[in-house]
Amino acid sequence: NHLVNDDMWWSDGDPLGYNYQKSTNTNFLDLALPFLRDKRVAVQAGGNCGWVTREISKSFEDVYVFEPDPSSFISICLNLPEGNVHKYQGCLGNKHELVAMAKDHGKGGSGADYINSSSNSENKIPTFLIDDLNLDYCDFIQLDLEGYEYFALQGAESTIDKHKPLIWVERCWHGRFGITDQDFDNFFNNKNYKLVERHGKHDYIYKHNG
C-alpha cells in the first residue's frame, strides 16, 4: 500500500484506481441525496480502498463496509479510522461460505476482484449476509460486487423488507454467475421498488414505492 497525493492510502495492485475514483465518484451521493429521507445507516460493498465509503460517511451517521481484498481492506482501515465506519474483510452473498477470489485482468486493478467458485485457491474469504447485521436502521445500500450483487440482495431481504432502504446497485458482470437483467427486475418488482435514477451505464438507483 502507498500514499497517493497525501490524501489516501491505496493498494499497490491498483495503480490507476485512485485517479479513476477521483474522476468518477467525487460527490458520489449527489444523485441519491434527493431520494434519501434519513441518513442514519448505510451499507456499502465492495469498499475497494475506501473512496466511495468516505463519500458516504460524510453524510451518514454509520457506514458498514465490506471488502474482500486484503490490500484494499488495509487501505480502508488506514483511510477511514473514524468510529462511524464499521469495516469487514469479507464478501456479501446469500449464504455463509468460504469463497475464492479471482481478478478480472481485462479490467485490471484491485477493484476488479470477483468471486470465483471454480478456483482451487486455498486462500478463502468469508461471505456474510447483510441480514447478519440485524440493523436497527438501514437507509441506504450501495453494492458494486463485480457481478455478485444479486446474491447480496438476496442476503438482505429481511433488511430490505423491514427498513425499505434506497438501493444503489451496479448491474454489470452478473452474467458470469448466470444472473439476468430480468432477475434484477423481478427482485425489485417483487419488493415494490422502482428505478428512480441512473449513474453512468451500469449503476441503478431504486426507491421503495411506499
Image (cartoon, rainbow, N blue to C red):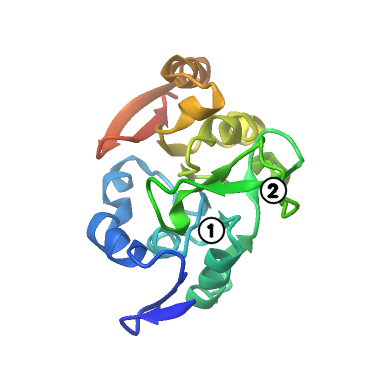
Q: Is mark 1 on a helix, strand or loop?
A: strand
Residue at 54 percent across and 21 percent down: it is 178
In the depicted structure, whether residue 82 falls above or below residue 29 = below
Relative to the observer, which residue lies in front, 140 or 73? Answer: 73
Relative to the observer, which residue lies in front, 210 or 150? Answer: 150
Percent position of residue 150, x then y: 54, 29
Q: Check the picture and name the quadrant holding the C terminus.
A: top left
Q: Is mark 2 on a helix, strand or loop?
A: helix
Q: What residue type is labelled 1?
A: Val
Relative to the observer, which residue lies in front, 51 or 178? Answer: 178
User: Along the polypeptide, which appears first: circle 1 or circle 2?
Assistant: 1
Q: Indicate left or right for 153 with 171 as reference.
A: right
Residue 106 seen in the current view? yes
Residue at 34 percent across and 40 percent down: it is 35
Q: Which amino acid does label 2 sit on?
A: Leu
Label 2 crowd bin: few (<14), some (14–19), many (20+), radius 10 Å: few
Q: Which residue is identified by label 2? A: 133
The numbered mark at residue 202 is none
Residue at 68 percent across and 40 percent down: it is 131
In the depicted structure, whether residue 44 falls above or below residue 53 = above
The answer to which quarter of the image holds residue 163 is top right
Percent position of residue 9, x then y: 44, 76
The numbered mark at residue 63 is 1
